[in-house]
Image (cartoon, rainbow, N blue to C red):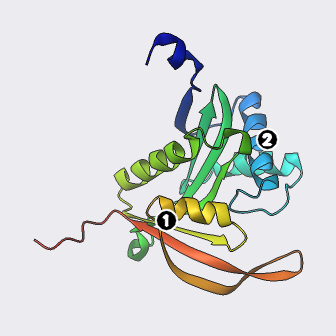
Amino acid sequence: MDHFTSSLLPKIQIEQIASLENEDDLHSLSEALEASIIAGYHCKWTKPPPRHLVENYFKSVLLVSEKLLFTARLDGNITGICEVTTPPKQKDSSLIAATIDIFAVAPYASNTGVEERLLSKMEHTVSQLGFPIINVIIDETQKKLFQFYLQNEYQHWATHPYYQKIDGQIVKGLLLYKSFLNTSSS
């Protein structure tokens, strides 16, 4: 690849963030989430909440020690978000699995590699922290996100028949997991 071609490729950065002191980042994070919700590529909301609630939500996430927040930047702007919860240390029986709470990528960043790199960084970090299982539950309307998880080796192991209500309709929940346990016998 020559210099001209490589300079045309989008620059992707994935990072785990510990603070949101930069107002531009907070706005960019909120905008990316709102865009992904509108496009139907999210993990928590069906309609964008008011901006101040989204901003307060992300500020509070960073106050919880069991929460990890990852962002994807495309050419410097936050376009992807992954929020993960790890089990509390006092619950020693559940110290095996982390749970994806939010995985959202703005539609203008799809097909750039942002999704895969964001997921990969989160998986690597969570695995390095000692959590070899990652769980996620999404509602059945999230077809694109469901396919994305399946393509990335998540296993659909159960369906909750009455997961939540969206626009007055009961929808199913799809439960998935990915294991990094070495299950081969020696």
Instruction: Give the mark nearest the N terminus, 1 or 2.
Output: 2
The quarter of the image holding the N terminus is: top left
Residue 120 at what x, y percent from top left? 45, 48
In the shown orientation, is residue 64 left or right of residue 26? Answer: left
Left or right of 24 on screen, residue 88? left
- According to the image, label 1 marks what residue? 88
Q: Is residue 19 above or below residue 185?
A: above
**x then y, percent, for residue 59:** 71, 45
Secondary structure found at label 1: loop
Kind of residue sitting beneath label 2: Glu
> Residue at coordinates 85% horizontally, 55% vertically from top-left?
48
Which of the 4 quarters of the picture holds residue 89? bottom left
Whether residue 75 is visible here, answered yes or no, is yes
Tell me the element at label 2. Answer: helix
Where is 183 relative to 30, above or below?
Answer: below
Q: Which residue is mark 2?
A: 31
Q: Position of residue 140 (x, y in %)?
A: 69, 74
